[in-house]
Amino acid sequence: MTGDGPGPVEAATAELAAWLAGAAGEDVPVGPPADGGVGLTLWPLALRPARQTRGTGTPTPYRFTIRYLVAAAGPAALAGLDRVLTAAATAGEPELVLEAGDPALWVTLGVAPRPALLVDVLAQVRSTPPVAPPVLHPLRLHRLDLRDLVGRVVGPQRQPLAALRVELVGTPYATHTDAGGRFRLAGVPHDPDHPDQPVRLRLVGRGRTLTAEVDPADADIVIVCEPPAR
């Protein structure tokens, strides 16, 4: 949400007031009910939390519900209230709550009890997406090759260690060692401009987690797992 235009409560109130005017056939002013008034009035009573949605990428709006009081003052207002109730019930929206008869509500508002409806309207605050900085230089494409990482995991006596999970740290690439302790990570991105840059592997299994730096250019990587220090 930015400073331009009405906020979510103001916008929702104006939209509901316009709908009420169309349904009732008369203008519905926004304001708390008052003794001596005539006709329908609309007033927001409370802001209530709504279930939030989460996702990735663009920030999701913050959602909440506004509860309004639609009150009728004077006998002539009953026909307008009838038309609003019928229109909402027929269309299925906005959501009506027939709980406006609580005496404490009218005591709080300082007016005599009168026929009324509660209307719940869903509103939201939209997050302003970040503005990407301008591109000041020509774009340069950097190509990455794909290669396989092939190796073995053995113990201190060169015995093969099977069923260990082998992960390329910081990536989703993972596999498990076979009965001979061998593993293969296929299609791993490789930067040809830095062929000697080591890669980090994480080994998980047998109650332990180890990391090892290996040379990706090595055709047969051997990782020796030492026993834990006592």
Image (tube, rainbow, N blue to C red):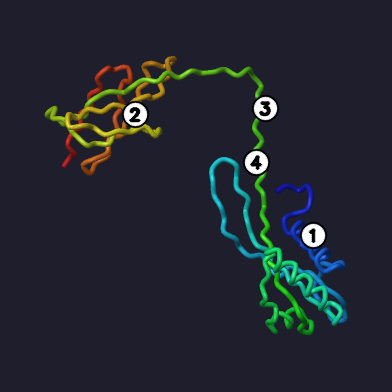
**In the shown orientation, is residue 31 left or right of residue 119?**
right
Nearer the camera: disc 2 or disc 1: 1
Q: Earlier in the sequence, mark 4 or mark 3?
A: 4
Place of residue 142 in the rendered image (x, y in percent of width and height, measured from the top left): 51, 18
Task: Categorize mark 2 by other alpha carbons within 10 Å: few (<14), some (14-19), many (20+).
Answer: some
Q: Earlier in the sequence, mark 4 or mark 1?
A: 1
Location of residue 39 with respect to 61 vertically, above or below:
below
> Marks 4 and 3, how far apart in space?
15 Å
Residue 38 is tagged as none
In the rendered image, which residue does mark 3 sit on?
A: 134
| Contact (Cβ within 8 Å) of mark 4 with mark 2 | no
Amino acid type, residue under disc 1 in the picture: Ala
Q: Earlier in the sequence, mark 1 or mark 3?
A: 1
Residue occupying image coordinates x 70% and y 48%: 1
**In the shown orientation, is residue 84 left or right of residue 56?**
right
Residue occupying image coordinates x 65% and y 30%: 133
Residue 200 is tagged as 2
In the rendered image, which residue does mark 1 sit on?
A: 14
Query: Which residue, as the protein is rendered here, is positioned at the far front?
Result: 90
In the rendered image, which residue does mark 4 sit on?
A: 129
Q: Quadrant of the C terminus?
A: top left
Place of residue 202 in the rendered image (x, y in percent of width and height, measured from the top left): 31, 34
| Contact (Cβ within 8 Å) of mark 2 with mark 1 | no
Amino acid type, residue under disc 2 in the picture: Arg
